Image: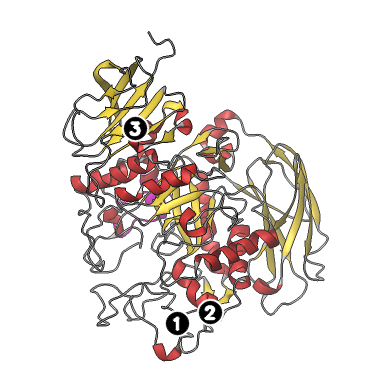
């Protein structure tokens, strides 16, 4: 297995008293301030910022409390040239106010950008609004993994770069090394993952009705409510890290002060441990997708704390802490509409961030893991000001991919991806009722279902990319009796096939960004079985009808046709093997369209799933 390139320095800490060195564009610059005054709760009482000016840039950039009397503001240069800043706060504090400085930003060379893709700049929408690219225009197809517990000790941090085998001794760098070699370029992380400590209590409980919470516990998941019996192996998990837990205890929920923390008292030491992982991801060319919290923390939050201001303050804390890292944001992991604040309440909190602090100063995009569709959950610009790209998720089977097509046609156009598709190994008895459409991890059937999620979602409009998931991994299972352990799930072949999606998409360069999804271009495209991963087909086509991509799930009928082609034209035709990433000629390599623009699809090379491409040569005979 290839070893990592050396870890390049990606952050510069500037001393306010010393001469400030040159930096590069898109390189984090950390400004550190020491408050002169004492504050009972610096997290809630103090807001610090700098007014940053540079070529084509003049914005206020907010900072965060980082323990004791330390406050930091993280900034960067978006263009080469001279940059200057001046600090201020909402307090009369000589340590925070009136500081000033400057730095010079240099451009990266093309060779330097090739060594670290994040040097191309932050992720932004393409001109047509349907896909991603870096700030310098280089196309970016997100290929992500679900490392929701990456902030915790379950993804062990080792200071050395020694390779460890995938097993109990494996750590964060070992897992990242694997995924980098498999072509991944992003990971989804929940900044403060729930389930704080092993407390010998079942993971699935209702809080005492006598307390009249009206919600389920913030740190538990759904359970067997009728008989109150926990399922085997499901108990509260320790989700702390070297710095402890994300928030302090005791909390304010009556009778449950040691169950639900005080979300108005943050623990910076926890996030310092996360900082080095976020920095390391960027240094290896990865984009972290940072979700501030899971939806089941928000119900108690909304009832027992000052909503929306308290939650808005936390969103802004995470967003300001990582605003100079190349990442994507989400104000909540909203995967299921129970144990959660309502979408209207969540919109209110996230909108409050934009109203008070503005959008992230360097253009970081924000979305939300969805309960089927972020458009369905949070609406369009009339309902939210914060959302700048869309996701679908937690609607697993091929019947749900259509929601990406609905998003594609919504206005304004926004990039979209499936953030929580079919999870590899999703045949687990712990689900109630058991999930009946999945297969054991590591099997050919499981690989097949994962591919359906990848290609079906992509061709339904998910041109921003795709996020992979698996059992054992999303919850970082390491407890005795866990099945599977996370290091076993990391090695399933389904993840190794994610890289082929990029080969499929980029077969005509960045032209995939011009595609318009339309499954009806394939006939037939559906069966009567709406929940599953076989028998359906998907297609997308450029407006000029000169480029088609299609995907046929296993058990699609032979003698399908693709319609909507140029009548009487002759198309180059190729098969794509999603198991190997190889292209090959379809038939003799050329297929005619008839008078109605129908192209007969040759028999599939085998009885498995296949990708398919039609291209119209510029000089079509």
User: Left or right of 139: which side holds 621?
Assistant: left
One can see residue 475 in this view: yes
Q: Nearer the viewer, residue 539 or 21?
A: 539
Of the two numbered discs 2 and 3 on the same chain, state the one appearing first in sequence.
2
Q: Nearer the viewer, residue 81 or 211?
A: 211
Residue labelled with disc 1: 214
> Which residue: 25% across, 57% down?
426
Sequence order check, earlier mark of 1 and 2: 1
Decide: marks 1, 3 in contact (CB < 8 A)?
no
Label 3 element class? helix
Nearest the viewer among 371 and 145 is: 371
Which residue is identified by label 3? Answer: 521
From this viewpoint, which residue is outermost toward the bottom? 210
The reply to whether dot 1 and dot 2 touch (C-beta < 8 Å) is yes
Tell me the residue that label 2 is attached to. Answer: 303
Inter-mark Cα distance, 1 to 2: 9 Å
Q: Is mark 1 on a helix, strand or loop?
A: loop
Residue 415 or 19: which is nearer the viewer? 415
């Amino acid at each position: 297995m290839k070893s990592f390139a050396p870890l390049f320095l990606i952050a510069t800490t500037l001393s306010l008293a010393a001469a400030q060195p040159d930096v590069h564009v898109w390189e984090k610059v950390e400004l550190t301030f020491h408050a002169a005054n004492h504050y009972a709760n610096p997290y809630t009482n103090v807001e610090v910022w700098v007014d940053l000016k540079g070529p084509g840039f003049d914005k206020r950039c907010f900072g965060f409390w980082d323990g004791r009397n330390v406050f930091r503001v993280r900034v960067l240069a978006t263009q080469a040239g001279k940059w200057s800043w001046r600090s201020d706060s909402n307090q009369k504090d000589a340590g925070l106010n009136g500081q000033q400085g400057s730095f010079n930003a240099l451009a990266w060379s093309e060779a330097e950008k090739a060594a670290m893709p994040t040097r191309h700049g932050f992720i932004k929408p393409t001109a047509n609004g349907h896909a991603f690219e870096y700030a310098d225009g280089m196309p970016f197809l997100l290929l992500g993994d679900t490392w929701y517990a990456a902030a915790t000790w379950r993804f062990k941090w080792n200071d050395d770069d020694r390779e460890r085998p995938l097993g109990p001794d494996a750590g964060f760098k070992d897992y990242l090394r694997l995924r980098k070699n498999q072509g991944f370029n992003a990971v989804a992380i929940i900044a403060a993952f729930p389930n704080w400590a092993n407390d010998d209590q079942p993971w699935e409980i209702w809080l005492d009705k006598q307390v009249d919470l009206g919600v389920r516990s913030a740190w538990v998941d759904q359970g067997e409510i009728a008989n109150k019996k926990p399922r085997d192996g499901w108990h509260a998990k320790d989700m702390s890290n070297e710095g402890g837990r994300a928030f302090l205890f005791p909390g304010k929920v009556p009778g449950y002060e040691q169950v639900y923390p005080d979300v108005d008292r943050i623990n910076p030491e926890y996030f310092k441990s996360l900082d080095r992982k976020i920095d390391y991801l960027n240094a290896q060319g990865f984009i972290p997708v940072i979700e501030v919290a899971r939806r089941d923390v928000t119900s108690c939050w909304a009832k027992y704390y000052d909503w929306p201001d308290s939650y808005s303050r936390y969103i802004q804390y995470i967003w300001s802490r990582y605003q100079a890292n190349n990442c994507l944001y989400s104000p909540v992991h909203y995967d299921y509409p129970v144990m959660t604040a309502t979408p209207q309440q969540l919109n209110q909190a996230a909108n409050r961030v934009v109203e008070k602090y503005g959008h992230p100063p360097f253009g970081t995009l924000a979305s939300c893991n969805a309960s089927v569709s972020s458009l369905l959950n949070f609406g369009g610009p009339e309902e939210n000001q914060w959302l700048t790209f869309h996701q679908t998720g937690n609607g697993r089977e091929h019947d749900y991919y259509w929601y990406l097509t609905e998003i594609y046609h919504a206005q304004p156009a926004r990039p979209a991806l499936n953030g929580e598709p079919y999870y590899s190994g999703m045949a687990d008895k712990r689900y109630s009722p058991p999930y009946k459409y999945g297969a054991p991890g590591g099997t050919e059937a499981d690989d097949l279902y994962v591919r359906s999620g990848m290609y079906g979602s992509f061709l339904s409009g998910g041109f921003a990319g795709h996020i992979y998931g698996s059992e054992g991994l999303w919850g970082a299972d390491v407890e005795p009796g866990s099945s599977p352990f996370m290091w076993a799930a990391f090695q399933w072949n389904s993840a190794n096939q994610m890289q082929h999606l990029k080969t499929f998409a980029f077969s005509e360069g960045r032209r995939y960004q011009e595609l318009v999804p339309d499954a009806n271009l394939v006939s037939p495209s559906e069966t009567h079985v709406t929940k599953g991963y076989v028998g359906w087909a998907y297609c997308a086509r450029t407006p000029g009808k000169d480029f088609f991509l299609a995907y046929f799930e296993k058990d699609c009928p032979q003698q399908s046709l693709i319609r909507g082609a140029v009548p009487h034209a002759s198309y180059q035709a190729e098969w794509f093997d999603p198991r190997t990433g190889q292209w090959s000629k379809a038939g003799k390599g050329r297929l005619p369209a008839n008078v109605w623009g129908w192209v007969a699809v040759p028999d599939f090379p085998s009885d498995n799933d296949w990708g398919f491409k039609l291209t119209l040569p510029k000089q079509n005979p």
